[in-house]
Image: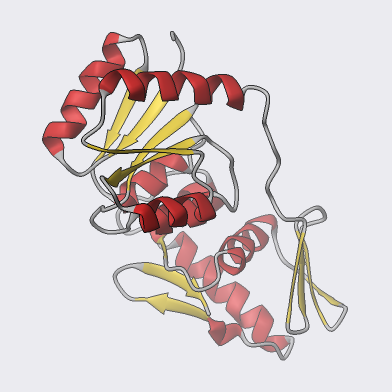
Amino acid sequence: MHGIHILLIEDDHTLNKQLTELLKSKGYQVEQCFDGEQGLLRAASLQHQLILLDVMLPERDGFSLLKILRKSCQTPVIMVTAKGAEQEKIKGFSQGADDYVAKPFNTDELLLRIEALLRRSQHMQKDVSAKEINLERLTLNNSTQTVTVDNNSLEFTPIQFKLIWELVQNRGEVLSKAYLYQRVLNRSMTAYDRSIDMHLSRVRRKLNDANWQGDRLQTSHGKGYCFL
């Protein structure tokens, strides 16, 4: 399994360590995360061939993380649920999980599920990105990276388009600045860097100038941004 990168998102430090040691002993390369927000940030980097995702996480739960992730990628995900939590399993599958294991689980079974999912995923690569979003007179086209209001084109830079696209397709979800820096600017956020704030301000102003509802791009203070 040389070269296979697994992202492990589990807040129980003891279990996280045990699983990491198990996976590494089988030749996998493992990146550890302990909360949902950091897990989403690393998952969005698209550097992993499989994700092991706990349901109950601090900062952002596994369901919310998976819902956002599935808007842009199909990295295989095995969700880790509580034993007997049938509703969690159903919700996980509805959000795009590929498989699940219930705590406490048999490690041999987990390894077999990982191997099987990795084999299947090699033949099931899919492009899940939407091509166009239409919303109350506003149209975003991802193929041409164009924005129109009532069929009138607005001048958006590529970065401005990526920003509004990311927020609109995740409508109702608060996206952290760190996540947006990675998805939109392709770099990590640094202290005192207000690039995303400035880009968002320009996007909001252009929408308002076109008599659309720029104030639907909301700031969630201390957390990030959200399109309502």
Q: Colour scheme in the image?
A: secondary structure
* Furthest residue in direction bottom, as rendered: 211
Q: Quadrant of the N terminus?
A: top left
Residue sitting nearer the eye, 182 or 60: 60
Q: Position of residue 54 (x, y in %)?
A: 30, 44
User: Would you say residue 179 is visible in this rendering?
Assistant: no
Residue sitting nearer the eye, 65 or 136: 65
Q: Position of residue 107 (x, y in %)?
A: 27, 22
* Picture residue at 47% right of the left edge, 72% below the top: 226
Left or right of residue 24, residue 224 in this image? right
Instruction: Note whether 7 is above or below 198 in the view shown.
Output: above
Instruction: Note whether 38 is above or below 106 in the view shown.
Output: below
Q: Position of residue 69 (x, y in %)?
A: 51, 49
Residue sitting nearer the eye, 179 or 228: 228
Q: Quadrant of residue 111?
A: top left
User: Would you say residue 176 is visible in this rendering?
Assistant: yes
* Picture residue at 44% right of the left edge, 41% below the top: 43
Q: Position of residue 189 (x, y in %)?
A: 38, 50
Left or right of residue 42, residue 214 in this image? right
